[in-house]
Image (spheres, rainbow, N blue to C red):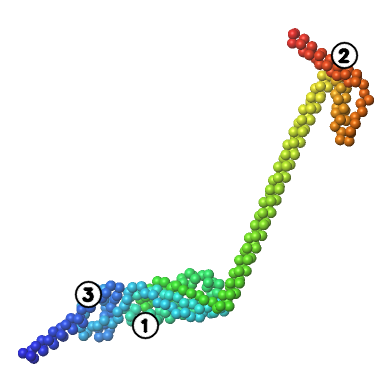
Amino acid sequence: MTIFSGFALTLLVLAIFIVATAVKIVRQGQEYTLERFGKYTRTLEPGLHLIVPFFERVGHKMTMMEQVEEVPSQDVITKDNAVVQVDGVVYYQILDAAKAAYEVNKLEKSIINLVMTNIRTVMGSMTLDELLSHRDQINTRLLTVVDEATSPWGVKITRIEIKDIAPPRDLVDSMAKQMKAEREKRATVLNAEAERESNILIAEGMRQAEVLRAEGRREAAFRDAEARERQAEAEALATKVVSKAISQGDSQALNYFIAQNYVESLKEMALSPNQKTVYLPLEASGIISSIGGIAELAKNALHQDGDNSKR
């Protein structure tokens, strides 16, 4: 009875062991490579699988999710012989578990070494200014080269990012001085341009003012000429009327011009700034007779208008 119990217990333990080794559960995001007598046969995808115990075993457990690895810092000599320290990160994803397991040994280390080598190659062909201003271009070139190199390994390089580019301290100080000089230069240029624009605006305003003043003078001259023309027409008309009156035998019309010139002369003598005393060696009767002649002329003109209206 004791021997039979021990044998049954042994069989039970053996059965449990066989079942445990025959049943494999693959988690989501992973794939297992299956080997038979040490040779790869197939890949186990996520889910429940049964294998042949003692003949088949799991070779490698591969993570199919996207992974990230730190790229250690290293010194890089640029095209213009500047030494900079560079580090970064690389993102990759296994697409073929069998190739990633059997085409390369130590996949993560191989990817990191490949990225570091290509960082030196790509950055070594560029100047320091290009490194600092074209980081996206560096990332794109690295991604293209490394992804092509890792394709036989069943790996897809999704991204390569340069985290930091650190030039030497003395070079940083020189760059800071250069940037300060450039800013001061731009400020000087902007001030000169602003002053030039201001001078142009002032000159333009002065030119416009001169144009407006010239137009004003021209308009005033035109008005003065027009006024003189009207005055000349009036004098011509008056002369014509007086001449007609004289031709008809009216001698009083001549007194009109004499009285007019007489009064204008007195006005100019009174308005002269250097004249303080005005002497009139004239007879009042002459002025009165001249004014009387003007009145007589006006009376005759009114009588003639009245006769013409009656007719």
The reply to whether callout 1 and callout 3 are in contact (CB within 8 Å) is no
Q: Secondary structure at mark 1?
A: loop
Considering only order in the chain, which callout, 2 or 3, is on the residue closer to the N terminus? 3
Residue 233 as seen in the image, left or right of residue 153:
right
Front position among marks 3 and 2: 2
Residue at the spot of label 3: 48
Q: Position of residue 35 (x, y in %)?
A: 26, 82
Name the amino acid type tagged 1. Lys
Res 180 → quadrant:
bottom right
Q: Secondary structure at mark 3?
A: strand
Residue lying at the far front of the rendered structure: 277
Please tell me whether residue 265 is drawn above or below residue 57 in the rendered image. above
Q: Residue at x 76, y 36 (%)?
A: 221
Residue at the spot of label 2: 249
Residue at the spot of label 1: 106
Q: Position of residue 47 (x, y in %)?
A: 24, 73
The mark total stands at 3
Q: Residues within 10 Å of mark 1 (few under 14, many from 20)?
A: few
Q: Which mark is residue 191?
A: none
Considering only order in the chain, which callout, 1 or 2, is on the residue closer to the N terminus? 1
Q: Position of residue 50 (x, y in %)?
A: 20, 78
Name the amino acid type tagged 3. Leu
Q: Residues within 10 Å of mark 2 (few under 14, many from 20)?
A: few
